[in-house]
């Protein structure tokens, strides 16, 4: 399909970034709480990440399919951690680590955008992929360590979305929403 992608109200991008940051902060702050609390907050953060990936696929990505699949991965991870009552920290770390590495790689752009935007997205992608690799490390991570790693990723993803919106001048694309 050729033509312009659908337009999006600028306030939605802002809210997605703010929700990402706040969810990540809560996840990091609550990482010392019991496992059921971490799982529930983590599931919310996973769903927020899934919606953010779908937002990217629908409204901003030059190649939407990988981002749409990534969104499905985040949502599937949320369902997995909630539906599997005896999930171990190792399984959770493996699932989150793999999805974070894929997320980080997808954030590293090609040649589209201004040099500063590409540099920001590359740095964000490398850091998120590194957090995913840390979750996949050989040592069995604790639930608290997983919460901190994923919380840091969620904060970084939200901050990157907010910075990108500000760099674009806070303007959405023209279209029926304006």
Image (cartoon, rainbow, N blue to C red):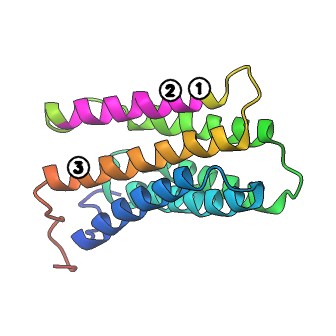
- The verdict on residue 121 being magenta is yes
Packing grade of label 3 (10 A; few <14, some 14-19, many >=20) is some
Find residue 50 and report its image quarter. Answer: bottom right
From the top left corner, tell me how far across and down residue 112 is, in percent.
Answer: 22, 36
The residue located at (46%, 31%) in the rendering is 105
From the top left corner, tell me how far across and down residue 122 is, in percent.
Answer: 32, 30
Comparing labels 2 and 3, the label whose residue is closer to the camera: 2
Pick the residue in front: 67 or 164. 164
Pick the residue in front: 112 or 108. 108
The residue located at (31%, 52%) in the rendering is 161
Find residue 42 and report its image quarter. Answer: bottom right
From the top left corner, tell me how far across and down residue 9 is, in percent.
Answer: 25, 73
- Write down the residue under mark 2: 130
The magenta-colored residue range is 117-132
Q: Can residue 109 be spotted in the picture? A: no
From the top left corner, tell me how far across and down residue 41 is, in percent.
Answer: 62, 61
Badge count: 3
Circle 3 SS class: helix
Q: Residue 133 carries which label?
A: 1
Question: Where the C terminus falls, by quadrant?
Answer: bottom left
Q: How far apart are marks 1 and 2 (CA)?
A: 5 Å
The reply to whether dot 1 and dot 2 touch (C-beta < 8 Å) is: yes
Circle 2 SS class: helix
Instruction: Point out the tag, 2 or 3, that comes first from the N-terminus.
Output: 2
- Write down the residue under mark 3: 164
Q: Distance between the residues labelled 2 and 3?
A: 21 Å
């Amino acid at each position: 399909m050729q033509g312009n992608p659908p337009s999006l109200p600028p306030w939605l991008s802002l809210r997605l970034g703010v929700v990402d940051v706040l969810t990540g902060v809560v996840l990091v702050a609550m990482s010392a709480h019991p496992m059921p609390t971490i799982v529930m907050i983590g599931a919310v953060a996973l769903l927020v990440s899934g919606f953010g990936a779908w937002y990217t696929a629908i409204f901003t990505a030059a190649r939407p399919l990988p981002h749409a699949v990534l969104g499905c991965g985040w949502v599937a991870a949320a369902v997995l951690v909630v539906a599997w009552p005896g999930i171990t920290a190792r399984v959770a770390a493996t699932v989150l680590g793999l999805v974070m590495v894929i997320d980080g790689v997808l954030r590293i752009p090609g040649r589209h955008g201004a040099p500063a935007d590409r540099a920001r997205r590359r740095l964000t992608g490398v850091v998120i992929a590194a957090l995913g690799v840390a979750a996949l490390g050989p040592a069995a991570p604790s639930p608290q360590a997983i919460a901190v790693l994923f919380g840091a990723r969620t904060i970084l993803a939200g901050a990157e979305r907010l910075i990108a919106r500000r760099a674009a001048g806070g303007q959405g694309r023209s279209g029926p929403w304006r």
